[in-house]
Amino acid sequence: MKIYHYTSIEKLALILENRTLRFNNAKFVDDPNEAITKDFGSMQDYVFISCWSNESTESIPLWKIYGNNCHGVRLESDTNYIPFIW
């Protein structure tokens, strides 16, 4: 399966330069309910996130939000080596 990540040219340069992907603390993502659980409440201090989409069709809203207002890039990765449970 392919997954996609929208980002700016500047962040792409950092990914290539450092050969790493950066995960954001859940406190600083757009969804305020990210990492909130019924059992433990807020886990935002302990959860780090990298947002990807499994939609192969490009998304104008994602381009605008994460792709530097449609002036960024969309990275593609293959997940065959990652054990996902859907």
Image (tube, rainbow, N blue to C red):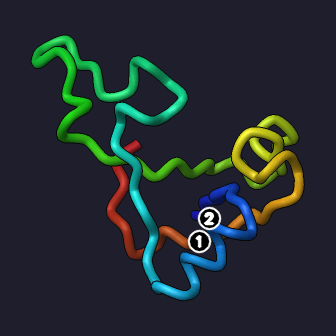
| Up/down of 74 relative to 15, above or below | above
Query: Which quadrant is home to the N terminus?
Result: bottom right
Question: Which residue type carries mark 2?
Answer: Lys
Q: Residue at x 43, y 63 (%)?
A: 22
In which quarter of the view is residue 65 placed?
Answer: top right
Name the kind of residue labelled 1 in the image.
Answer: Ser
Q: Secondary structure at mark 1?
A: strand
**Residue at 52%, 48% in the rendered image:** 51
Q: Earlier in the sequence, mark 2 or mark 1?
A: 2
Q: Is residue 84 left or right of residue 30?
A: left
Q: Which residue is mark 2?
A: 2
Does 2 sit above or below residue 86? below
- Tell me the residue that label 1 is attached to: 77
Compared across the picture, whether 32 is left or right of 60 comes to: left
State the SS at label 2: strand
Q: As displayed, is residue 74 above or below residue 14?
A: above
Percent coordinates x, y for residue 30 in the rendering: 54, 29
Please name which of the two marks, 2 or 1, marks the residue nearer to the observer: 1
